Image: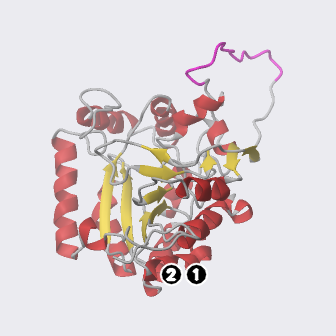
Amino acid sequence: MTPIRGRGTTTNPHNRFASSVSVAEDDGWHQEAPLTQGTEVRIETAKTVISRNTSPDLPFDRSINPYRGCEHGCIYCYARPSHAYWDLSPGLDFETKLIAKTNAAEVLAQQLSKPGYVCSPINLGANTDPYQPIEREQQLSRRLLEVLLRFRHPVTVVTKGALILRDLDLLAELASHRLVRVMISLTTLDDELKRVLEPRAAAPKARLRAIRVLREADVPVGVLCSPMIPMINDSELEQLLQAAKAAGAQSAAYMMLRLPLEVAPLFEQWLHDHYPQRAAHVLSLIRQSRGGELYDSRFGTRMRGEGVFAELLEQRFRKASRSLGFEGREALALDCSAFCPPGEQMALF
């Protein structure tokens, strides 16, 4: 298929909840595929913004996603299937038809002010990136950080967007109270691979600069090498860790490629479009690491995989992390004791 400039996929498959399916047929009237596809932003008035989870695979039990869909267009994104809940496609719709929770900051303040709320770090960007391109105009993530700072509430941020540096003032203030930790997602150092894998995400050099600038401002920052894709970027693992460490990253983590639901056929199509000669080998290694399937949703294995390839990848990560001297997550723990809704008196003891 003809690639669409700046987009991760050219297809828009029906979501799994669609009540009807239409199939395009060639009627002989040939038309060129559009070279660009604009972004549409819809508005959602949210009733709640804190999502909770009980997953043993995650280091947090609550998160906020100010946006549904993500303009970065990463072909592998495990969040793509969530667009089906809005009767939208996990394909091109996920990248081009975005939903912004414009009242997110106000709702967050209301939820944090409720009697009985128990403070624990909130993750910003667990599903879609809080610093995707539309954040430049919407500024929802910045407004959320302002609320969290006002309430002295700890937050962790995961992003591959260099736009995070716009909020350096807030992040530095949060860091001075031990209330923030940032993880920068770094997938490849190859600009050409980044271009087709994560079309509208920041360039590798921009992400490394973000790590460096955050650390210079004393903001705790780590690197997330995710996802590791067999025969696509897994050979870069040690280089990614070395580059991040040189930029100032204090901690490191990785995850193996996940292909839930509609993501699997989208990724397969991407492989055949961009890496046709190695597509079969890549898919074979994924199946070897997922019990013969393209995805295994079981807790404990879905983030790492299993089998020879997955075990070797984990050994490589542990060895490189140890030799580079990355700190453990416990060394960067956040402070929950300072939480205090505005207008309330902090406890004396």
Task: Assign the C terminus to one quadrant of the image.
Answer: bottom left
Chain part drawn in magenta: 15-29
Q: Residue at x 34, y 39 (%)?
A: 282
At a point 31% along the width and 27% down the height, the residue shown is: 293
* Residue 307 % position (x, y): 17, 38
Give the amino acid at mark 2.
Ala
Quarter occupied by residue 324: bottom left
64, 90: nearer the viewer: 64
- For residue 89, say whether it is visible: no
For the question of whether residue 312 can be seen, the reply is: yes
Q: Is residue 31 above or below residue 309?
A: above
**Secondary element type, mark 1:** helix
Residue 207, position as x, y percentages in the image: 49, 70
Q: Is residue 111 magenta?
A: no
SS class, disc 2: helix
Identify the residue at horizontal 64%, vertical 13% (top origin). Answer: 19
Residue count near mark 1 (Cα–Cα under 10 Å), binned few <14, some 14–19, many ≥20: few
Asked if the residue at tag 2 contacts the one at tag 1, i.e. Cβ–Cβ closer than 8 Å, the answer is yes
Circle 2 is placed at which residue position? Answer: 172
What is the number of callouts on the image? Answer: 2
Left or right, 330 with reference to 220: left
Q: Quadrant of residue 317?
A: bottom left
* Circle 1: residue type: Asp
Pick the front one: 300 or 333: 333
Helix, strand or loop: magenta stretch = loop
Q: Residues within 10 Å of mark 2 (few under 14, many from 20)?
A: many
Could you tell me how far apart the alpha carbons at marks 1 and 2 are, in whole angstroms? 5 Å
Residue receiving disc 1: 169
